[in-house]
């Protein structure tokens, strides 16, 4: 049985995408390669984990290209939604409710951070 699982985000700009999640309180745990522009960044916030990889990773590893459109959704819950959303607001992403489909707030999440694969 799996001990842990986490989403992997395919990004055109790995550093920019990882930095977006760092502004949401995630901390960088791993980076490959360790120096220079990363192709992989592992992030953690409490028990929550996610990884950001270069958009060309699936093609290199599996011979499959990243498809267009929405490829993931992530919800980040915290004890203080307003305080948690404040750093994300600095990214320029719109804030709003889940029903708006994009935003940062108590019941919303960014559907595609800046630098993610398109």
Image: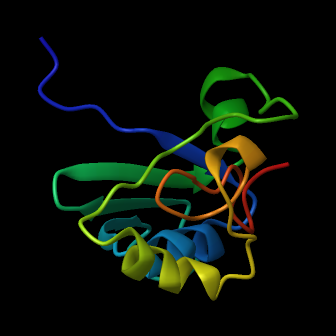
Q: Could you tell whether 33 is left or right of 5 in the image?
A: right
**Residue shown at the point (59%, 64%) measured from the top left:** 104
Q: Considering only vertical position in the picture, is 36 above or below 17?
A: below
Q: Position of residue 26 (x, y in %)?
A: 34, 70
Q: Position of residue 17 (x, y in %)?
A: 61, 68
**Residue shown at the point (68%, 61%) measured from the top left:** 96
- Is the image coloured rainbow, by chain, by secondary structure, or in one colour? rainbow
Q: Determine which quarter of the picture holds residue 15.
A: bottom right
Q: Position of residue 12 (x, y in %)?
A: 75, 59
Q: Position of residue 3 (x, y in %)?
A: 11, 26
Name the residue nearer the viewer: 33 or 84: 84
Name the residue nearer the viewer: 91 or 63: 91
**Residue 77 visible within the image:** yes
**Residue 101 visible within the image:** no
**Residue shown at the point (30%, 74%) measured from the top left:** 27
**Residue shown at the point (64%, 57%) measured from the top left:** 110
């Amino acid at each position: 049985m799996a001990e842990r699982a986490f989403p992997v985000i395919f990004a055109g700009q790995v550093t920019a995408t990882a930095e977006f999640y760092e502004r949401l309180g995630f901390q960088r745990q791993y980076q490959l390669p360790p120096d220079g522009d990363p192709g992989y960044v592992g992030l953690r916030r409490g028990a929550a984990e996610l990884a950001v990889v270069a958009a060309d990773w699936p093609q290199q590893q599996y011979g499959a290209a990243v498809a267009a459109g929405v490829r993931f959704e992530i919800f980040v819950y915290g004890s203080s939604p307003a305080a948690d959303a404040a750093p994300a607001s600095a990214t320029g992403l719109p804030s709003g409710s889940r029903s708006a489909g994009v935003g940062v707030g108590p019941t919303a999440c960014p559907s595609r951070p800046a630098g993610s694969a398109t």
